[in-house]
Image: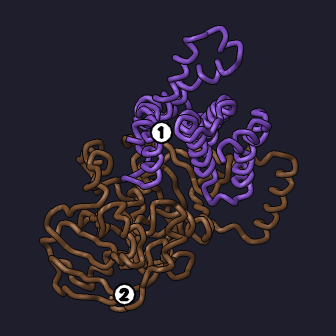
Amino acid sequence: MAHRWTNKLTKADVTPEAIWLNRRQIIAGLTAAGMTGALAGRAEAAGDTLEPNSFDDITSYNNYYEFGTGKNDPAANAGALDTSNWSIEIDGMVDRPGTYTLADLTEGLTEEERIYRFRCVEAWSMIVPWNGFELADLLAKAGVQEAARYVAFETVVQPENMPGVRRKVIPFPYVEGLRIDEAMHPLTMMATGIYGKPMPNQNGAPIRLVVPWKYGFKSIKSIVRISLVADEPPTTWNNLNAREYGFYSNVNPQVSHPRWSQATERVIGGGLFAKRQETLMFNGYEEEVAALYDGMDLTKNY
Amino acid sequence: MIDALNTSLRKLPAWTLYIVAPLPAAFWLWQGATGASGPEPIKALEHSLGEFALQLLIVGLAVTPLRKWTGLNLLKFRRAIGVVSFFYVLLHFLTWLVLDMSLLWGQILGDIVKRPYITIGFIGFTLLIPLAVTSNNASVRKLGARWRKLHKLVYPAVLLGGLHWVWLAKGWQVEPLLYMGAILAILALRVIPKPRKRALAA
């Protein structure tokens, strides 16, 4: 079931190296002439190419409250996370419940690279080249039963390694959930790496969820338990503040959050003078996922 | 000890504060420009300026209790501390307006009206404007007793500043709560009467 989603760009869109080099020279010339502004505007209008953030950006600006609430805390503290002998308990409405090792879960599956937009509810965003597998393929190993309507996820709790857990900044374990059709959607993946490297601890090693059309907090990190259930499962931020964080939490520039207008976002890595960028409906994946929410009032089901 | 300190402080002119004051802002700007403050330099700058403004406001408010309880006299620096803290609040506000919000006026006005933590931060800032404007000898003379009354606006302003941070943080975070505690404590010290020596002896 891998490769159900691919970037719309093909090899044909890749600029031949000679022309590309030539273009670099033209750009260099234009830069010298102070014309980059106009050029950047045109490149943006041309569109689809997503230039990933640097590995450094992606691994030094994180929300992982188990390791502290500061953006740099996870990078500073997550070295202590113990990822050895990792296993995931899969239970609930599955044919083969049990404790699966990472190798069990990924055996025979095709690892893919997916370059996705990543949009935090705090109105910042990055482009991340994930490596991983479709969640649907992993769940198939356990055999999802017909009656299952939701999937619940749980993050590991290691108090001795996690200063944020010891300080109880929010209730732990961190829990999240998806509707079954969201979970089975080809865009939804379980990521085990970034830039072809094993998942860094601060980004949710060794395995995490990635749901690119939802706010980042839905993409739960360091997963140790997956439950297939009949009812909408509790989710951490929704429990803390239901008015601010809905179960769905789809990226939606029209539905304003009480803390952050979601109309625009700040792209990380642009430096001190980077302009805000308009936020796209479903984070730019409207074509792929809008049908999941047909007939739903997205201002009520935020 | 306190007397010695007061004596040496008497020799230090208040204007030295204005010379030193811009240095942290310049340092943070330089850090942001060189990437030393991480991949999101705008938020880092905004946060550093805001936190420092709050620290300065607290220091300014500590002058009276310090004199009352320890005898340390920093009174002649108080105006400079106040003016500098206003400039840091202003820089914090401008960073938000220009760098963070890219001068998107529709969204900016919406945020000020609709988002409580921004609303109270903005009110706190506006309360400080008349204080900054009247921080000169001519205004003190002209306003007389009303000047003291007017400058009591710093109490609600600093409370709003502290609340602004507590509210904007997701969940209950330690740092903003510590600042809020410090603000409440320092305001309480102004209300609590100093115990008399005689009462202590008894």
The percent coordinates of residue B73 (x first, y second) are 64, 36
Is B5 or B95 nearer to us in this picture?
B5
Q: Which chain is brown?
A: A
State the image quarter where residue A179 is shown.
bottom left
Q: Secondary structure at mark 1?
A: helix
Pinpoint the chain carrying mark 2.
Answer: A
Q: Residue at x 36, y 69 (%)?
A: A165
Which numbered disc covers residue A86? 2
Mark 1, residue position: B186
Is A233 or A33 nearer to us in this picture?
A233
Kindly tell me whether residue A112 is visible in this rendering. no
Q: Secondary structure at mark 2?
A: loop
Pinpoint the chain carrying mark 1.
Answer: B
Q: Residue at x 70, y 44 (%)?
A: B5
At label 2, counting other C-alpha atoms closer than 10 Å, the crowd grade (few under 14, some 14-19, many 20 or more) is some
User: Looking at the image, what colour scheme do you see?
Assistant: by chain
The percent coordinates of residue B4 (x first, y second) are 71, 44
Residue depth check, mark 1 versus mark 2: number of the one nearer the observer? 1
Q: Residue at x 84, y 61 (%)?
A: A25
State the image quarter where residue B6 is shown.
top right
Q: From this view, report whether residue A115 is shown above or below residue B82.
A: below
Q: From this view, report whether residue A232 is shown above or below residue A272.
A: below
The amino acid type of the residue labelled 1 equals Ile
Marks 1 and 2, Cα distance to the nearest angstrom?
50 Å
Q: Residue at x 66, y 28 (%)?
A: B79
Q: Which chain is purple?
A: B
In the image, is B2 to the left or to the right of A102?
right
Direction top: furthest residue: B142
Is B144 or B163 nearer to us in this picture?
B144
State the image quarter where residue A205 is shown.
bottom left
The answer to the question of whether label 1 and label 2 lie on touching residues, with beta carbons closer than 8 A, is no
The amino acid type of the residue labelled 2 equals Trp
